[in-house]
Image (cartoon, grey):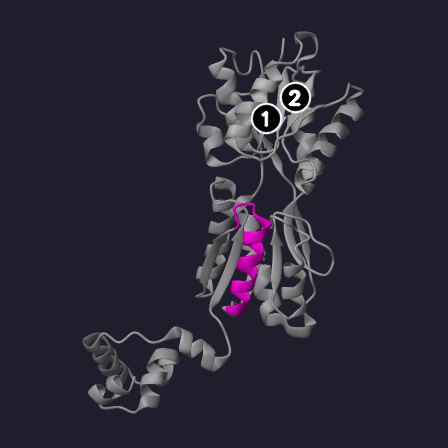
Amino acid sequence: MKDVAARAGVSLGTVSNVLNRPERVSDRTRRRVETAIETLGFVRNESARQLRGGGSRTLAYVVLDTSNPFFTDVARGIQETADAQGLVVYLCNSGDDPHRQAAYLDLLEQQRVEGVLITPADAADPGIAALARRGMPVVVVDRGAGPDRCSVTVDDVLGGDLATTHLLDIGHERIAFIGGPRALGQVADRIAGAERALARAGRGALTVLETTHLDVSEGRRAGERLIGLPAARRPTAAFCANDLLALGLLQQMVRLGLRVPEDMAIVGYDDIEFAEAAAVPLTSVSQPRHLLGRTAAELLLAEAHGGADHEHRQVVFDPELVVRTSTRPHP
């Protein structure tokens, strides 16, 4: 900055004003300083500026799985809000690993980010509560949270009900749920919604095929298990905990020479872009992915700037069913 000031023939304070408060500087002087900056190739040290000012212009999103397009869309929503505020977003992929999640939380606190958004691999991680206790704004994304923390999620019980009611309405009586582990809150809620719909209709029990992960390969393996059931009690429809599982199941049905939806109707969850682009377009329970991200970032900034007056909010959106070719009235 001293070199810029000397070349432009102005004070160090004038250079600082051009960089931080340009409205205080005349157009002529500002152009002279900007020319000096360009000529010298000056790039200010943002880390030093933040350290001196005690503030940060960065947020962080600790995402569960970057290979899942659902979370990519949520991250884009977060980025949109951050861009509007002139903020940078660090994206950290925990890979559904609680140890990696804990390491990221420690690192982000050391970096003094303005706040942390997290879709937790382990919601009970004491590091999350410890961050909040030490004054770091934390918002839980795509998971519920208690009254002591902001969160943004979708009513997954309603989502499970919507999917199963649709399958019942088109004539299916034997329905499977594919997803897991069941201990994951969202999976349990989606199962609860499916069971609620079955109970309301006076139908039989839900066949639950639990998976270890929520990915395409687990969907293919679930397809093998599903077809291995005795024909007399084999489900004719499957509701999957997410679209990746549903795509894997669809692949396995095609591989085995079965028709979708004639031999097996399939409903996914999330309504990622690939759901509509599948060989057999998937019916899916749609979540407002971008809106989840934008709302979460807005809550985080409100907490970061709200001080002692901030009140935690738990925002819950309603999902919607998007019907496509993978479900059709069952004869």
Q: Does dot 2 land on a helix, a strand or a loop?
A: helix
Q: Position of residue 306 (x, y in %)?
A: 63, 71
Residue at image point 66% right, 13% down: 234
Q: Position of residue 54 (x, y in %)?
A: 51, 79
Q: Which stretch appears magenta?
A: 94-110
Q: Amino acid at mark 2?
A: Leu
- Quarter where residue 213 is shown: top right
Q: Which residue is mark 2?
A: 167
Q: Position of residue 11 (x, y in %)?
A: 30, 92
**In this picture, residue 118 sits left or right of residue 11:** right
Q: Position of residue 232 (x, y in %)?
A: 69, 7
Q: Residues within 10 Å of mark 2 (few under 14, many from 20)?
A: many
- CB within 8 Å, label 1 to label 2: yes
Of the residues under marks 1 and 2, which one precedes in the sequence? 2
Q: Residues within 10 Å of mark 1 (few under 14, many from 20)?
A: many
- Residue 20's place in the image compared with 295, above or below, is below
**In this picture, residue 18 sits left or right of residue 84:** left
Q: Amino acid at mark 1?
A: Val
For residue 95: magenta?
Answer: yes
Q: CA distance from mark 1 to mark 2?
A: 8 Å
- Residue 11's place in the image compared with 69, above or below, is below
Q: Does dot 1 land on a helix, a strand or a loop?
A: strand
Instruction: Decide which of 16, 91 is in the foreground and name it.
Output: 91
**In this picture, residue 272 sits left or right of residue 35:** right
If the image is split into quadrants, where does the C terminus sit?
Answer: top right
Q: Which residue is mark 1?
A: 267
Instruction: Decide which of 6, 251 is in the foreground and name it.
Output: 251
